Image (tube, rainbow, N blue to C red):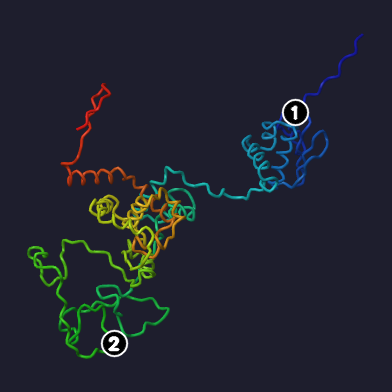
Amino acid sequence: MAASKPEQVPLPSIGREVGDGTVVINDRCRVETRHGYRVVTVCGVVVASYACGDRMSEAHAIVNLVEQGFAKQSAVAIAFGCDERTVRRNQRRFESGGLVALGRPVGYPKGVARVPRSRVALVNDWKAEGVGHREIARRLGVSAKAARNLIRRLGWESPVAEQGALGFGAGDPNLSGSSATPTPNTPSSPPEPTESGPEHLPEGGDPNLSGSSATPAPKTPALPPEPAESGPECFAEGGDPNLSGCSDEPSLPTSLDRDPADRCLDRVLACLGMLDDAAPLFRSGTKVPSAGALLAIPALVDSGVFECAAEIYGSIGPAFYGLRTTVAMLLLMALMRIKRPEALKEHSPQALGRLLGLDRAPEVKTLRRKLARLATYGRAAELGRALAQRRVAARGHAMGFLYVAPGSGAATRR
């Protein structure tokens, strides 16, 4: 009589607990968790032991099980409650950086955008409407810090509280508004409105001054204003000839700085949100690098590229390097055969700034931020169309046309 075969006990399925916190990986590998510690065994031999929550040790145990051939990626992923991509990612990290690379810090990975690119256009629209950082964060479902960093990366300047009294009102910024010394550490309040009229001014006073001094000035005869260079034909019909300039001409940019090599005042005004673009100030010098590129500036101005850019884009916000300076910098780069912003690292910012009439030219990070800001508008086609229409209107007789006959593959040039 043949001996009966012993009954085979079926092994528990992969990833199922068999009791006492033991999880089966395969027929020879198991993971046991007790009292806050975890032990990985292979054929009863302990190959790894670590405290629960030690992510680096757990990742190392996962890598060892797969690399030594004890278990497959799928079985290990099921037993440890992770995805197979996590197992493969840990293997790549261990191969490239060893055990240290497995200790990834807790938190959102650095360099990965929290907001998808599809919402960048929405953020630009909301900022253009004046929506605050916290409201944008609420709409996106992210923290206020993440929204603030995203807005800064898009090129939007941080909002600055409006300054109460800087003395740059209707008066001359070179004159002090009051001779009395202000009290330190006290918020300045706007002056109370007073009745305007010649009877309230002191004798010999100038009504163009922004404020009256505490001590009356000595009586001196007021000097008559110097005559303007523009003739009578410059004034509009019915205009006042006492005005200093024409109303049809746009106001030219001005600067409070006197030293072209030091534009600290204009930079302060740009930080306060009171300057859209720094005015160019040039100084004399010898051996200026690439000074020949300035010979093309009259032709560029005549082409209308600056006027068309101002009409299409308007403004890119309060900044020291505004729209006009950014466009001029890009045109000068094209004339100097600088193909990309990264190549600016090979040139001196001070030398390039002399070509722009500034103390320094925008560097790589600043220029790329300006380009990203202009790209978000999506108006490059409109700018090209405006320049083409201007060229056709000015030199339409010299334009050529290319006719392509459909299906023939031949082109007729005229």
Query: What whole-number distance in Å separates the C-alpha atoms at marks 1 and 2?
Result: 96 Å
Mark 1 vs mark 2: in front:
2
Q: Residue at x 67, y 48 (%)?
A: 103
- Dot 1: within a 10 Å radius of its alpha carbon, few (fewer than 14), some, or many (20 or more) residues? some
The location of residue 276, given as percent across then percent down, is 32, 61
The location of residue 22, given as percent across then percent down, is 76, 37
Vertical side of 333 occupied by 62: above or below: above
Quarter of the picture containing the N terminus is: top right
The location of residue 82, given as percent across then percent down, is 64, 37
Q: Residue at x 28, y 51 (%)?
A: 309
Q: Residue at x 28, y 67 (%)?
A: 254
Compare marks 1 and 2 and give the one earlier in the sequence: 1
Q: Which image quadrant is residue 280 in?
A: bottom left
The location of residue 188, given as percent across then percent down, is 36, 76
Of all residues, the one furthest to the front in this rendering is 287
- The answer to whether any part of residue 347 appears in the image is yes
* Amino acid carrying mark 1 in the image: Pro
Q: Quick one: 153 or 356, which is closer to the camera?
A: 356
Q: Which image quadrant is residue 267 in?
A: bottom left
Of all residues, the one furthest to the left in this rendering is 238
Q: Which image quadrant is residue 186 in?
A: bottom left
The residue identified by callout 2 is: 214
Vertical side of 128 occupied by 358: above or below: below
* Amino acid carrying mark 2 in the image: Ala
The residue identified by callout 1 is: 12
Q: Position of 19 compared to 325: left or right?
A: right
Q: Quick one: 295 or 208, which is closer to the camera?
A: 295
